Image (cartoon, rainbow, N blue to C red):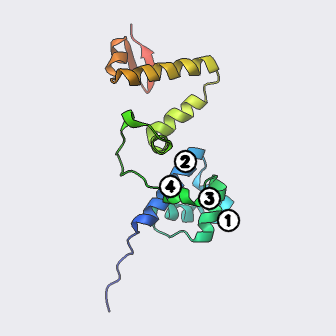
Amino acid sequence: MRPSKARQPSNIDVQVGSRIKMRRAMLGISQTRLAESLGITFQQVQKYEKGLNRVSASRLSQMAEVLGVSISYFFEAERPSGVFNAGALATDDDLMFFLSTPEGLALNRAFGRIEDAKLRRQLSSLVNAIAEAGVFEHVAEASYRFADGDLAEVG
Protein backbone atom coordinates (compact mmCIF):
# COMPACT_ATOMS: atom_id res chain seq x y z
CA MET A 1 0.00 0.00 0.00
CA ARG A 2 1.21 3.48 -0.85
CA PRO A 3 1.51 6.09 1.88
CA SER A 4 -1.18 8.68 1.33
CA LYS A 5 -0.10 12.16 0.41
CA ALA A 6 -2.13 15.17 1.42
CA ARG A 7 -3.70 16.77 -1.62
CA GLN A 8 -1.99 20.02 -2.53
CA PRO A 9 -4.44 22.76 -3.50
CA SER A 10 -4.36 23.65 -7.18
CA ASN A 11 -3.39 27.17 -8.19
CA ILE A 12 -6.93 27.94 -9.32
CA ASP A 13 -8.40 26.73 -6.00
CA VAL A 14 -5.97 29.00 -4.16
CA GLN A 15 -6.80 31.93 -6.46
CA VAL A 16 -10.56 31.49 -6.06
CA GLY A 17 -10.10 31.23 -2.29
CA SER A 18 -7.94 34.34 -2.25
CA ARG A 19 -10.55 36.29 -4.19
CA ILE A 20 -13.29 35.10 -1.80
CA LYS A 21 -11.22 36.29 1.16
CA MET A 22 -10.34 39.60 -0.49
CA ARG A 23 -13.95 40.43 -1.36
CA ARG A 24 -15.20 39.37 2.07
CA ALA A 25 -12.58 41.59 3.73
CA MET A 26 -13.38 44.53 1.44
CA LEU A 27 -17.02 44.29 2.51
CA GLY A 28 -16.09 43.92 6.18
CA ILE A 29 -17.91 40.59 6.44
CA SER A 30 -16.65 38.01 8.95
CA GLN A 31 -16.14 34.38 7.98
CA THR A 32 -18.99 33.49 10.36
CA ARG A 33 -21.39 35.94 8.73
CA LEU A 34 -20.50 34.72 5.23
CA ALA A 35 -20.90 31.12 6.36
CA GLU A 36 -24.34 31.84 7.83
CA SER A 37 -25.40 33.49 4.57
CA LEU A 38 -24.33 30.36 2.69
CA GLY A 39 -25.70 27.83 5.19
CA ILE A 40 -22.26 26.36 5.97
CA THR A 41 -19.77 26.50 8.84
CA PHE A 42 -17.11 29.18 9.17
CA GLN A 43 -14.53 26.37 9.04
CA GLN A 44 -15.75 25.54 5.55
CA VAL A 45 -15.29 29.20 4.55
CA GLN A 46 -11.73 29.02 5.94
CA LYS A 47 -11.03 25.94 3.84
CA TYR A 48 -12.42 27.62 0.72
CA GLU A 49 -10.32 30.74 1.36
CA LYS A 50 -7.14 28.68 1.75
CA GLY A 51 -7.93 26.66 -1.36
CA LEU A 52 -8.00 23.43 0.68
CA ASN A 53 -11.54 22.61 -0.45
CA ARG A 54 -12.82 23.20 -3.94
CA VAL A 55 -15.85 25.42 -4.33
CA SER A 56 -18.63 23.80 -6.34
CA ALA A 57 -20.24 25.74 -9.18
CA SER A 58 -23.50 26.13 -7.28
CA ARG A 59 -21.71 27.30 -4.11
CA LEU A 60 -19.59 29.73 -6.15
CA SER A 61 -22.76 31.14 -7.70
CA GLN A 62 -24.26 31.55 -4.22
CA MET A 63 -21.06 33.24 -2.97
CA ALA A 64 -20.99 35.61 -5.91
CA GLU A 65 -24.54 36.68 -5.10
CA VAL A 66 -23.81 37.17 -1.37
CA LEU A 67 -20.59 39.08 -2.10
CA GLY A 68 -22.14 41.18 -4.87
CA VAL A 69 -19.83 40.14 -7.71
CA SER A 70 -20.05 38.12 -10.89
CA ILE A 71 -18.73 34.56 -10.93
CA SER A 72 -15.94 35.68 -13.26
CA TYR A 73 -14.61 37.91 -10.45
CA PHE A 74 -13.20 34.81 -8.73
CA PHE A 75 -11.17 33.87 -11.81
CA GLU A 76 -9.70 37.25 -12.72
CA ALA A 77 -5.93 37.37 -12.83
CA GLU A 78 -4.24 38.36 -9.64
CA ARG A 79 -0.71 39.69 -9.20
CA PRO A 80 1.86 37.59 -7.39
CA SER A 81 1.92 38.29 -3.66
CA GLY A 82 3.79 41.45 -2.76
CA VAL A 83 3.93 42.83 -6.30
CA PHE A 84 2.50 46.31 -6.19
CA ASN A 85 3.48 49.39 -8.14
CA ALA A 86 1.93 52.37 -6.39
CA GLY A 87 2.88 54.65 -9.25
CA ALA A 88 0.89 52.65 -11.77
CA LEU A 89 -2.68 52.64 -10.42
CA ALA A 90 -4.22 53.10 -13.83
CA THR A 91 -7.04 50.59 -14.02
CA ASP A 92 -9.89 49.29 -11.91
CA ASP A 93 -7.91 46.06 -11.49
CA ASP A 94 -4.96 48.02 -10.08
CA LEU A 95 -7.27 49.81 -7.67
CA MET A 96 -8.92 46.54 -6.60
CA PHE A 97 -5.50 45.02 -5.99
CA PHE A 98 -4.43 47.98 -3.84
CA LEU A 99 -7.68 47.83 -1.86
CA SER A 100 -7.02 44.15 -1.17
CA THR A 101 -3.72 44.92 0.57
CA PRO A 102 -3.73 45.47 4.34
CA GLU A 103 -2.70 49.10 3.81
CA GLY A 104 -5.40 49.68 1.21
CA LEU A 105 -8.10 48.19 3.41
CA ALA A 106 -6.98 50.16 6.48
CA LEU A 107 -6.76 53.41 4.51
CA ASN A 108 -10.15 52.91 2.90
CA ARG A 109 -11.87 52.06 6.17
CA ALA A 110 -10.30 54.96 8.06
CA PHE A 111 -11.10 57.42 5.27
CA GLY A 112 -14.70 56.21 5.23
CA ARG A 113 -15.07 57.09 8.92
CA ILE A 114 -14.24 60.76 8.28
CA GLU A 115 -17.60 62.53 8.21
CA ASP A 116 -16.40 66.01 7.24
CA ALA A 117 -16.50 66.23 3.41
CA LYS A 118 -14.14 69.23 3.35
CA LEU A 119 -11.57 67.35 5.41
CA ARG A 120 -11.85 64.32 3.10
CA ARG A 121 -11.19 66.57 0.08
CA GLN A 122 -8.19 68.14 1.85
CA LEU A 123 -6.75 64.75 2.73
CA SER A 124 -7.26 63.60 -0.83
CA SER A 125 -5.39 66.67 -2.07
CA LEU A 126 -2.57 66.02 0.40
CA VAL A 127 -2.21 62.39 -0.69
CA ASN A 128 -2.27 63.42 -4.36
CA ALA A 129 0.45 66.02 -3.71
CA ILE A 130 2.61 63.43 -1.93
CA ALA A 131 2.09 60.94 -4.78
CA GLU A 132 2.97 63.55 -7.41
CA ALA A 133 6.11 64.53 -5.50
CA GLY A 134 7.14 60.91 -5.72
CA VAL A 135 8.64 60.63 -2.27
CA PHE A 136 7.27 60.56 1.24
CA GLU A 137 10.32 62.42 2.61
CA HIS A 138 8.68 65.74 1.63
CA VAL A 139 6.09 65.18 4.32
CA ALA A 140 8.78 64.32 6.87
CA GLU A 141 10.66 67.52 5.98
CA ALA A 142 7.48 69.51 6.66
CA SER A 143 7.95 68.77 10.40
CA TYR A 144 5.56 65.84 10.61
CA ARG A 145 6.16 62.33 11.85
CA PHE A 146 4.21 59.14 12.31
CA ALA A 147 3.54 58.29 15.93
CA ASP A 148 1.68 55.05 16.61
CA GLY A 149 0.13 55.13 13.15
CA ASP A 150 -1.05 58.75 13.42
CA LEU A 151 0.43 61.74 11.63
CA ALA A 152 1.44 64.30 14.23
CA GLU A 153 3.12 67.71 13.98
CA VAL A 154 6.55 67.86 15.62
CA GLY A 155 7.59 70.77 17.85
> Considering only order in the chain, which callout, 1 or 3, is on the residue closer to the N terminus?
1
Q: Secondary structure at mark 1?
A: loop
Say which quarter of the image contains residue 131: top left
**Residue 33 can be seen in this image:** no
Nearest-to-viewer mark from 1 and 4: 4
Q: Residues under labels 1 and 2: Cα distance?
A: 19 Å
Circle on res. 39: 1
> Considering only order in the chain, which callout, 4 or 1, is on the residue closer to the N terminus?
4
Residues at circles 2 and 3 in contact by the CB criterion of under 8 Å: no
Nearest the eye: 76 or 39 = 76
Q: Residues under labels 1 and 4: Cα distance?
A: 20 Å
Nearest the eye: 90 or 53 = 90
Q: Secondary structure at mark 4?
A: helix
Name, please, the residue furthest toward the front: 90
Which amino acid type is marked by label 1?
Answer: Gly
**Left or right relative to 84: residue 28:** right
Circle on res. 25: 2
Q: Position of residue 97 (x, y in %)?
A: 45, 45
In the picture, the quarter occupied by the C terminus is top left
Nearest the eye: 148 or 111 = 111
Q: Residues under labels 3 and 4: Cα distance?
A: 11 Å
Label 4 belongs to which residue? 19
Give the total of numbered labels. 4
**Residue 86 can be seen in this image:** yes
Which amino acid type is marked by label 4?
Answer: Arg
Q: Position of residue 29 (x, y in %)?
A: 61, 49
Label 3 belongs to which residue? 64
